[in-house]
Image (cartoon, helix red, strand yellow):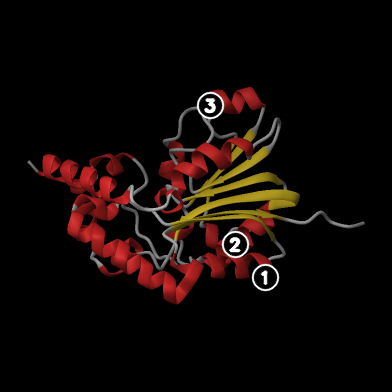
């Protein structure tokens, strides 16, 4: 019964959303996976996958095809150990907030990880220390000011997990449900931290879509209205999610 109710409301929410400009209906994580990351890794690159744990971005087959080397860094050694055999050439069980890299990465991937660290400034320092001169950092994260992020910060952990997995059963199969902090996790704050660590913003994409409120049409309509009000006050910092491609400038001799 619940699944039928949720399914009907999601269909109605999607129908209502079709009246909005396409820009407001684009999914950030899907865009990151379909349009951004496929061009990120080149042949023989050294890739650091930050927070990928048991689900690294590159499949074993794609990694082999590219001849890439992948380092997996995650705070949870158990998550790293559960990754497919051959996915990582090296694993590092370490807190990203305090990690010190060796400046050897061609590509750093940080997908849906920054919201889970309590010190985003430390995480950005770690990423800047990991990537080589001329290398790039690819980030996808939800924004601290999104309504779902605000709720995530105030609801008790056990309550929000029960609600999340009841309404979105498939999310129990991934990395959803981990404790989130959203520390300094807005576009303006990410850009300020990037500049402070000597990184250039090569690309920025902001997204205004999330699926959490689509399960109940009145909540969905209230969310869209609230989102508009947030935008009038905070502009880009009212985005639901964002993508950044950061580059470490070449060292001049």
Q: Secondary structure at mark 3?
A: helix
Label 3: how many residues lie within 10 Å, few (<14), some (14-19) or many (20+)? some
Q: In the image, what residue occupies the spot 28% across and 66% down?
A: 151
**First of labels 3, 2 by sequence position:** 3
Q: Quadrant of the N terminus?
A: top left
Determine the residue positioned at 58% across, 35% down. Answer: 38
Occupied quadrant, residue 226? bottom left
The residues bearing labels 2 and 1 have C-alpha atoms spaced at a distance of 9 Å
Q: Are marks 2 and 1 in contact (CB under 8 Å)?
A: yes
Q: Which residue is mark 1?
A: 196
Q: Nearer the viewer, residue 129 or 251?
A: 251
Image location of residue 207, percent across then percent down: 46, 55
The residue sitting at the right extreme is 253
* The disc label shown at residue 124, or none: 2
Q: Secondary structure at mark 1?
A: helix
Residue 165 appears left or right of 96 = left
């Amino acid at each position: 019964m619940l699944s039928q109710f949720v399914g009907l409301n999601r269909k109605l929410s999607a129908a209502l959303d079709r009246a909005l400009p396409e820009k407001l209906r684009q999914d950030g994580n899907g865009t990151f996976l379909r349009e951004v990351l496929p061009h990120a890794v080149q042949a023989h690159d050294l890739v650091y996958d930050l927070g990928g744990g048991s689900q690294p971005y590159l499949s074993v087959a794609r990694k082999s095809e590219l001849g890439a080397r992948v380092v997996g860094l995650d705070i949870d050694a158990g998550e790293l150990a559960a990754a497919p055999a051959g996915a990582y050439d090296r694993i590092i069980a370490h807190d990203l907030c305090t990690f010190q890299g060796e400046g050897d990465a061609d590509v750093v991937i940080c997908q849906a990880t920054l919201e889970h660290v309590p010190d985003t400034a430390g995480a950005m320092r770690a990423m800047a220390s990991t990537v080589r001169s001329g290398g790039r950092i690819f980030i996808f994260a939800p924004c601290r000011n999104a309504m779902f992020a605000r709720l995530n910060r105030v609801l008790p952990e056990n309550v929000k997990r029960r609600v999340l997995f009841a309404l979105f059963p498939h999310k129990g199969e991934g990395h959803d449900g981990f404790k989130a902090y959203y520390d300094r996790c807005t576009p303006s704050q990410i850009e300020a931290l990037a500049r402070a660590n000597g990184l250039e913003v090569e690309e920025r994409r902001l997204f205004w879509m999330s699926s959490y409120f689509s399960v109940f049409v009145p909540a969905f309509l209230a969310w869209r209205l609230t989102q508009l009000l947030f935008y009038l006050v905070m502009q880009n910092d009212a985005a639901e999610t964002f993508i950044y491609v950061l580059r470490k400038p070449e060292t001049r001799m």
